Image (cartoon, rainbow, N blue to C red):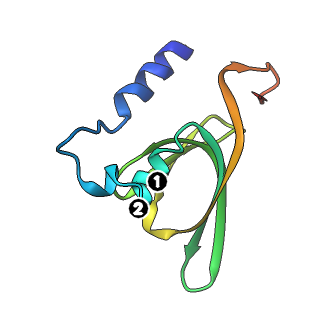
């Protein structure tokens, strides 16, 4: 089951090559910078409307030109997020061991 989920993730990732748009390859742009953070635990805050901040916490799975995919720690679901609504991103220095679920619904940190 975990292998099937991993295969689906690998197929979903955006392929970057020399013909890719600069926003996905040059780290001065948000999508390219966030692509360098794939696999890290992060808190992403979104501006909804004119003054409402909403946050999501999860593992950054993928980044496209206009979206990010966050995997929730609690439910192992993927959330598609609009990159243009992002106001703040807090990136953890801790890495998550994706392959070792601790059996209690959580993940092992190292």
Q: Which residue is mark 2?
A: 28
Residue drawn at the location 23% of the way across and 53% of the way down:
21
Question: How far from the left and from the top, in percent, is residue 90?
Answer: 67, 57
Is disc 2 surrounded by few (<14), some (14 to 19) or many (20+) residues within 10 Å? few
Asked if residue 15 lies left or right of residue 101, the reply is: left
Q: Quadrant of residue 106?
A: top right
- Tell me the quarter of the image containing the C terminus: top right
Does the CB distance between marks 1 and 2 fall below 8 Å? yes
Residue drawn at the location 64% of the way across and 79% of the way down:
52
- Disc 2 element: loop
Question: How far from the left and from the top, in percent, is residue 31?
Answer: 41, 55
Residue drawn at the location 32% of the way across and 49% of the way down:
25
Q: Quick check: 87 above or below 57?
A: below
Q: Could you tell which of marks 1 and 2 lies nearer the N-terminus? A: 2
Asked if residue 101 lies left or right of residue 34, the reply is: right
Asked if residue 106 lies left or right of residue 13, the reply is: right
- Tell me the quarter of the image containing the N terminus: top right
Q: Quick check: 22 above or below 73?
A: below
Viewer-closest of 14 and 103: 14
Viewer-closest of 22 and 97: 22
Q: Quick check: 34 above or below 75?
A: below
Q: Quick check: 1 above or below 14?
A: above
Question: How far from the left and from the top, in percent, is residue 46?
Answer: 58, 68
Give me the C-alpha separation between circle 1 and circle 2: 7 Å
Question: How far from the left and from the top, in percent, is residue 95?
Answer: 68, 34
Q: Which residue is mark 1?
A: 33
């Amino acid at each position: 089951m975990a292998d099937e989920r991993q295969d689906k993730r690998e197929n979903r990732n955006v392929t970057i090559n020399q013909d890719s748009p600069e926003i996905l390859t040059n780290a001065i742009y948000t999508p390219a910078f966030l692509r360098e953070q794939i696999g890290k635990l992060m808190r992403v805050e979104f501006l909804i409307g004119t003054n409402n901040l909403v946050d999501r916490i999860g593992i950054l799975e993928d980044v496209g030109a206009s979206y990010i995919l966050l995997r929730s720690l609690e439910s192992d679901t993927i959330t598609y997020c609009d990159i243009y609504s992002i106001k703040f991103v807090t990136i953890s220095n801790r890495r998550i061991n994706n392959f070792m679920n601790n059996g209690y619904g959580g993940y092992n940190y190292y």
